[in-house]
């Protein structure tokens, strides 16, 4: 939905090995906004 608004994406949606799923944008003043959701990793971390 954010793409439909024309908001430039700084970091595309991705899943990190430690369990976070996130993407990032910048507001009109250049302030970074990281939108994060926690999702447990598939495998236990050593």
Image (cartoon, rainbow, N blue to C red):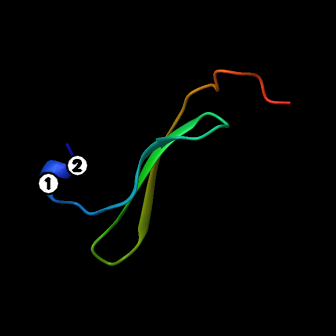
- Residue at the image point whose x is 26% and y is 63% from the top: 8
Mark number for residue 25?
A: none
Q: Which residue is mark 2?
A: 2
| In this view, 30 is above or below 14 | below
**What is the quadrant of the C terminus in the image?**
top right
Residue 34 position in % (x across, y down): 46, 55
| In this view, 41 is above or below 13 | above
State how many labels appear: 2
Q: Which residue is mark 1?
A: 5
Left or right? Give the position of 2 relative to 11.
left
| In this view, 32 is above or below 24 | below
- Residue at the image point whose x is 71% and y is 21% from the top: 43
- Residue at the image point whose x is 32% and y is 68% from the top: 27
Residue 6 position in % (x across, y down): 16, 59
Name the residue nearer the viewer: 23 or 37.
23
Left or right? Give the position of 23 relative to 20.
left
Residue 3 position in % (x across, y down): 20, 51
The answer to whether marks 1 and 2 mark residues whose Cβ atoms lie closer than 8 Å is yes
- Tell me which corner region of the image, top left, top right, bottom left or bottom right, holds residue 44: top right
């Amino acid at each position: 939905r954010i793409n439909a608004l024309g908001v430039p994406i700084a970091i595309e949606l991705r899943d990190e090995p430690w369990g976070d799923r996130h993407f990032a944008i910048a507001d009109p003043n250049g302030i970074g906004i990281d939108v994060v959701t926690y999702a447990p990793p598939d495998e236990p971390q050593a």
